[in-house]
Amino acid sequence: MIQRYTRPEMGEIWTLENRFEMMLEVEKAVAKAQAELGIIPKAAANSIQKKAKFNVKRIEKIEKQTKHDVIAFVTNVAENVGPHGRYVHYGLTSSDVLDSALSLMTVRAGEVLSKSLKRLEQAFVQQIGNHKLTLCAGRTHGMHAEPTSFGFKVSSFLAELRRNQGRLKTALEEMSIVKLSGAVGTYSTGGENVEKRVAEILGLKPELVATQVIPRDRHANLLNTLALIVAGLERLAIELRHLQRTEVGEVVEGFSKGQKGSSAMPHKKNPISAENITGVARLFRGYASSAMENVALWHERDISHSSVERVIFPDAFILTDYAVDRMAGVISRIEVNEQRMIDNMDLSRGALFSSHVLLKLVDKGLSREEAYKIVQRVSHSMNGKGDLQSSLLADAEVRKYLNEKDLAPIFEGKTHKKAIRKVVDRALKSKAGSFKNSKSVRG
């Protein structure tokens, strides 16, 4: 991923240096377990623990000849260990190390991403508290529907975020897998006890049944979970872009001192972060699709998944973390124009309350169809004059059933505010999923 979209804490996890570091962590754990089980000499395991190291440039030089990055890595580590280097990678196949190392990287990336999601969650909660009952127009098909509140809008995104936090927790746990079962997964060159012990050392779980690789449904599930997180961000980004349009003007992304919106038009304040996140989502869907393509490999495995995963795993985690963090900043600094929300509601001259007028007429004894026709007729006959409340009170047929006392609570928004408060409070009390890298969680 380009540096522009890479936050340091997440980017460091996906460097080539750290990839080899995780591979070395696996190799050391294997040597330790094999020594404990009497498979290799304890002196060899001790040498590996103390002397095993690598040099990226040396690995790259060896790989030019071997055309195999894992062999180049193992060769470099073994030459640093010395005579006991022959026990490095003992009984393993390349995918044992690669897949187990990838599990470690995703676990650690998941912890960083979870912290970013928590910041966004806190930003949502703050805005919900600020605007729980700030009424605004709810829109369906882009048209005024019924009143809602800005806090209610945000509550929808909070609830979605918390569902995605739970999904992420499950997907990360499913990816917390060590696989050391050898060339086609049969443990022919190493016992299951080694895999079980290494799993304990690394804080992972053994794969139940592997081929030469960890089955890629796990990986696809994780990438699709990240795609859902980003899709949720896009849904919010689209809403913010619409609300910031000049004709709407209900929210504005925070504009910092010295910021400029256009090289030609000094007055501009654009929803650049929301647009950026929309673009990220477009890119991200390709990663999820590629992960699905990786599930079907030839026989016990081929390496068609390898080149794909070298790109999509770093990019997916880095981009998700970036987008979540950027949205957290947007939400925490967003400017809400409460007066504009009221003014926009007034554009429909009370028509937003039509459904409650319909129900009030039903309560008075009319059939729903009769009530619907009356309210529709009065609403459509305003023709830019007056408002729905006054038009209803001026209508002879309506006055047979309703008076000002019946209509006032509806058009004051009291019914809506009561319902909104209940749902928003329920959303705030909902629980978020969480993920921590602890052996007790995965043990």
Image (tube, rainbow, N blue to C red):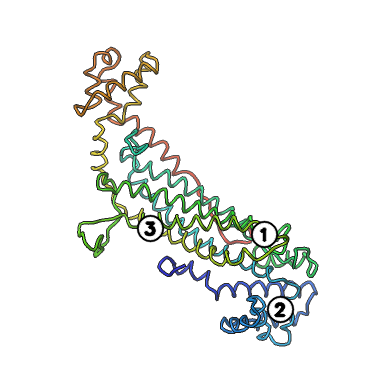
Amino acid type shown at disc 1: Leu
Name which of mark 1 and mark 3 comes first in the sequence. Answer: 3
Quadrant showing the C terminus: bottom right
Q: Position of residue 276 (x, y in %)?
A: 38, 58
Farthest residue, direction bottom: 82
Q: Which residue is mark 1?
A: 297
Determine whether 58 is above or below 164 in the image: below
> Measuring 62% from the left and 68% from the top, which residue is drawn there?
101
Judged by depth in the image, the label closer to the viewer, 2 or 1, is: 1
Helix, strand, or loop for circle 1?
A: loop
**Image quadrant assignment for residue 357:** top left
Quick one: 204 or 17, which is closer to the camera? 17
Name which of mark 2 and mark 1 comes first in the sequence. Answer: 2
Judged by depth in the image, the label closer to the viewer, 3 or 2, is: 3
Helix, strand, or loop for circle 2?
A: loop
Exactly how many numbered labels are in the figure? Answer: 3
Q: Residues within 10 Å of mark 3 (few under 14, many from 20)?
A: some
Q: Which residue is mark 3?
A: 276
Q: Is residue 396 left or right of residue 158?
A: left
Q: Position of residue 32 (x, y in %)?
A: 71, 74
**Image quadrant assignment for residue 218:** bottom right
Q: CA distance from mark 3 to mark 2?
A: 46 Å
Q: Which residue is mark 2?
A: 88
Helix, strand, or loop for circle 3?
A: helix
> Measuring 41% from the left and 53% from the top, which residue is drawn there?
122
